[in-house]
Amino acid sequence: MIRMENYLGRIELSRDFLVQLVGNTAIHCFGVAGLAPVLPTKRLLGKSSLSDGIRVRCRNNALVIELHILVSYGTNISAIVKSIVNKVRYAVEETTGFSVAAVHVYVDGIKS
């Protein structure tokens, strides 16, 4: 659970909800071929789910989001990363009302 306090009281959100929100937003960005699993054993076995490449933490009443992605071959990686950062930040802040301190995007591979 992600918990935040504000002048209205305590707000609690499921970590799974945030992971699904971030994952669905990132997957629909142009040039993203998929999410990469963070754990090497899952990467070797080829098993992955939406939550494997995403971490969401709360620090100083703001969210810190980490994404591990695979990009499509021939696309501009810096443009893809900027797009993901902007779209994920907007989606999370508009949907939840929580502020996002940082969105870290790690490109783990290229798919053809």
Image (tube, helix red, strand yellow):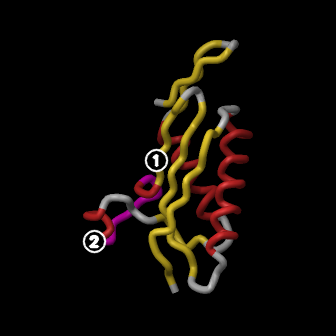
SS for tag 2? helix
Kind of residue indicated by mark 1: Arg
Is 107 contained in the magenta span?
no
Q: Do the residues labelled 1 and 2 touch (CB within 8 Å)?
A: no
- Can you give x and y, in whole percent of width and height, for residue 30 in the image? 68, 71
Is 46 contained in the magenta span?
yes
Sequence-wise first label, 1 or 2:
2
Q: Is residue 45 left or right of residue 88?
A: left
- Label drawn at residue 44: 2
Q: Which of 28 and 77 is in front in this view?
A: 77
- Using the numbered discs, state the Cα–Cα distance from disc 1 to disc 2 in whole angstroms: 20 Å
Q: In this picture, is 86 found above or below 3? A: below
SS for tag 1? strand
Span of residues in magenta: 44-51
- Can you give x and y, in whole percent of width and height, for residue 62 in the image? 60, 33
Kind of residue indicated by mark 2: Leu
- Can you give x and y, in whole percent of width and height, for residue 4 in the image? 57, 23
Picture residue at 58% right of the left edge, 27% below the top: 61
- Label drawn at residue 55: 1
Picture residue at 25% right of the left edge, 64% below the top: 41
Q: In this picture, is 16 found above or below 1? A: below
